[in-house]
Amino acid sequence: MPSWPTETKYISHPTTRIDGAAKVTGNARYSSDIQAEGWLYGMILRSKWPAAKITGVNLDQARKMPGIKAAVLVRDLPFTVRFYGEEIAAVAGVSKQACQDALRVIAVTAEEQPFAVRENDAKKPDAPRVWQNGPNYVEPKPHERGDVDAAFGKCAAVIEGFYTTPVQIHNPMETHGNTVSWTDDGVTAWSSTQGISSVRDGLAGSLRLEHSKVRVITDFMGGGFGAKFGAGVEGMLAAKLSQQAKAPVRLMLTRFDQNLAVGNRPSSFQKIKLGAAADGTLLAFEMNNYGTAGIGAGSNQGGGGGGADIPAPYLYKVGSSRVSQAAVAVNAGSSRAFRAPGNPPASFGMESALDDLAVKLGMDPLELRLKNDPNPVRQREYKLGAEKFGWKQKYRKPGSSPGVIKTGIGCAASAWPAGGPSRNTHGEAQINPDGSIEFRLGVQDIGTGTKTVIAVVAAEMLKLKPEQITVKVGDTRFPPGPGSGGSTTCASISPTVYDICEKALDQLQTLSGIADARGENWFAACKKIGVNPLLVSGKWIEGLSSNPAGGVQFAEVEVDTETGLVTVKKMLGVHDCGLLIDTLTLESQINGGIIMGMGYALYEERVMDDLSGVVLNPNFETYKLPGIADVPEIEVVLINMPERGVIGIGEPATVPTAGAIGNAVANALGVRIGSLPITPAKVLAALGKVPNVHA
Amino acid sequence: MKAFQYATAYSPASARELVGDQGAYIAGGNDLLSLLKDYLASPDTLVNIKSLPGLNTVERGEKSWKIGSLVTIAQLENDPEVKRVFPGLNDAAAEIASLQIRNVATVGGNLAQHSRCWYFRHPDVPCLKKHGGLCYARNSENRYHSLFSGNDCISPVVSSLATTFAALDATAVVLRDGQELRWNMAALYEEAWKNPYAHNSLKPGDLIVRVEIPTVRSRSAYMQVSDKHTFDWALVSCAAAAEVVDGKLKSPRVALGSISPRPHEVAAANDFLDGKVLDDSVAEHAAEMIMRDARPFEFNGYKIPMARALIRRTLLKLKGDA
């Protein structure tokens, strides 16, 4: 069995990103920077109606506008649009302004239809149907484990709570988009994607081309968080425009577009009943949950259905449980996978309920967790975290903090069942006689440091320095690898690079006669390769990676009880992900996960207007994200477990943050705010300070 | 945006001539360019006023300061004399937007900026302010909207300088066809109070040239609460100013932003405060008077307790070390 080196110079140590300088100097060329020879701008005409039958679209005027080279429909007429912002047509032209002017002269004939954009409205039996052949919501059947009613009867304490989480929109720094060039030789797409292979296959499918005729390139991309696995409608439109215009077309979404149509995390409305024995042992759990995945709820069942379910009961061991949940379809953009799908809302609901139960039991909430978390790693993390955080010294009974500005603490945990490898990960290295070496893997670096991980593992294995390793990823001409989702990339590529290195060393030994080609012997051994470089292929091998990962987080907050403002003073995260590769990019991932979780806890929320059916906040002015002044001291504690091999960390880092912050706010106030985001308005309402108004 | 002519003016008279009836003045351009990009305004001419003489200076008189309308927010934020004489103005400037915006945004532009209402700013919602038939905010998402309004539109004034200038009893000097009009803040926003289509009282071609602030109120303070800690609009803002003589308030004024189409001022509360020694109960009573007639909608009732807290705190800041 292969095994990772035990004495390491780079693995489990901090290494600066190998492309950091290129990124901060602007030399890194992101998908949105691509300027292919003779390229045009592309832009999309979107529905102004939340629901309508589109019966006519006249592109003639647009085609005659100055600088316009192509105009295409999204599909054949007539067709139905089901949300404000759904794609109707697209144009390509020599400037953004030319495209904008052209979009404004496209005449669209539409039969407006009634719509429902809010979960509670869409759930009603007489609500306008999002999908014509089924209702928006179907009462779910409960899944029962054990005798729940009997178990509740045995509980010493039972709480009932209503915990809600909003639709969170994917807003990576780089919007969705592609530059597509379609010539007789095939299609080349420079895509902002998490999955070059899935984009290639998707584009080939929708354009009816052989997969081998499509090449996808992603040198640098600015984040995806689960929403960028396909070429999307925007990629397909860019390709059609390119074909018609006979020129490459760059079609990057605007921030406005980004907030309408390319992904979000479903909402949740969780009614939870939780009961425990007097010693805190959880005996019974009941949950009724619904949420919306936009038009993604039930599109395949012809009505309400899946798409917004969350794991429940989350993470903790409960004797008996009854869970009913279903998605409700609304006239809004579809959800997509979003960093740890299902987990942040599940964590917020369960962790909130747990703290409410702790209050009723008169128990320290940390003790209640230790009592019921079956996972030994998290037990260790809780104890370590509590000590570093000073939980015992800081913990006060809920609401007992004196003064107008109250402090509180809270904690929560995450479990991420994935994080393991994709077995179909391939790669190659080209070793040149001068000792230079280039690794090529058909994966993509979505900003998490994938290239650096490859360099770190290779440097360790070959006893070179990371900066001596050239890394190329993000091209479907390279040996294929998986999409970057589910925290799987690190666990996929690390063993692959290990395999390539082992094979390279074997071959170098044979070629050079030098027993150990690593380190100081490297250049001497490479000299013996001869004229042609050595090309070594490898693939993922067993025994060097595993799953799952998890972690716990602690939050300390201040809440101004007169203005309602919540200030996070400190976050502490204790996380495990097996063998740590680059501790610097790893900490960076956890910082990012916590900051994203802060956004979920305090600021982010898609606001739908029920009168007009539009998204009211499709911009960073009113779709609020944490800014640097909102971010507190973040302490990251890493548990290195080399014996488990490599595991990914992307998702578990963001799961427990909102639960921990929500619990800290409840601890400060002595009142639960069960609805995210926790805004000043909600704090003041929870404190009973807001006059009731009937609309 | 629609195509436009661009011209630079070197005198107020030529600026007026160039701007015509369909043009717009541009200085920092922060608000104007976003209105243009969203097709919410489509002037035929942009007249660059950055070269108008004398508008980017601060004249420090003993009784009154004259702040040119081209003075940037960053100048107000970084000037130690502003901090000493008008600490409230200094605090208000520091809370505006981001550093990058403060570096180019001007006093005139801050006062003249248009509504931030998310229905108004949305390209596909025909709201009342855009001459549609309906104030959507009244009937739907009104968390950021007004508690007071004299018309059917409930989008509030969001200029934190306007709030502060109101408390300082400042005068905006507006050039209208060669004549100088002198407006206090109530007058500058009077039209927005009455008329759903207006966001201030400026008519096409009107140019704010300076703001005059009396120095008599040696104490001033400004506070706001936003959802976020920086670079976010105030949910409620509050400014207060007064002279303090023998521990007693003299000529006190309180004004609030983001809760009314004009800076919200209640003369009776100012009268009540006059001659009082500030303490918690005096401040609380003033807050109660100022917010008494608030008419909340479904989602903005939280602004009432928030405003009351801010009024109390801002007033108590006037006590300073005295």
Image: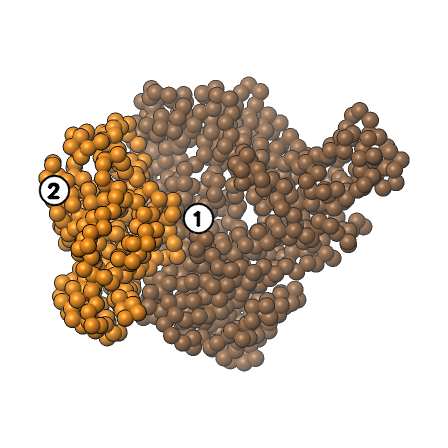
Chain colours: A brown, B orange
Tell me which residue sits at (19%, 42%) in the image.
B209
Question: Taking A57 as reference, is B53 above or below it?
Answer: below
Q: For label 1, count other residues whose C-alpha is less than 10 Å away and answer few (under 14), some (14-19) or many (20+).
A: many
Query: What number is the disc on residue A614?
Result: none
Coordinates of residue A621 in the picture (x, y in percent):
36, 48
Coordinates of residue A381 in the picture (x, y in percent):
62, 65
Would residue B298 be visible to someone looking at this image? no
Tell me which residue sits at (37%, 67%) in the image.
A560
Per the image, the residue denoted by label 2 is: B180
Would residue A641 be visible to someone looking at this image? yes
In the visual, does B225 lie left or right of B294? right
Nearer to us in this view, B24 or A323 = B24
Q: Which chain carries label 2?
A: B
> Residue most toward the left?
B179
Coordinates of residue A183 in the picture (x, y in percent):
53, 20
Cα–Cα gap, marks 1 and 2:
49 Å
Q: Mark 1 lies on which chain?
A: A
In the visual, does A164 lie left or right of B135? right
Tell me which residue sits at (43%, 67%) in the image.
A558
Say what amino acid the circle numbered 1 marks.
Answer: Ile
Say what amino acid the circle numbered 2 marks.
Answer: Glu
Nearer to us in this view, A110 or A399 = A399
Quarter holding the C terminus of chain A is bottom left
Tell me which residue sits at (18%, 34%) in the image.
B12
> Residue most toward the front?
B62
In the visual, does B269 lie left or right of A535? left
Coordinates of residue A309 in the picture (x, y in percent):
50, 55
Per the image, the residue denoted by label 1 is: A169
Question: Taking A217 as reference, is A129 above or below it?
Answer: below
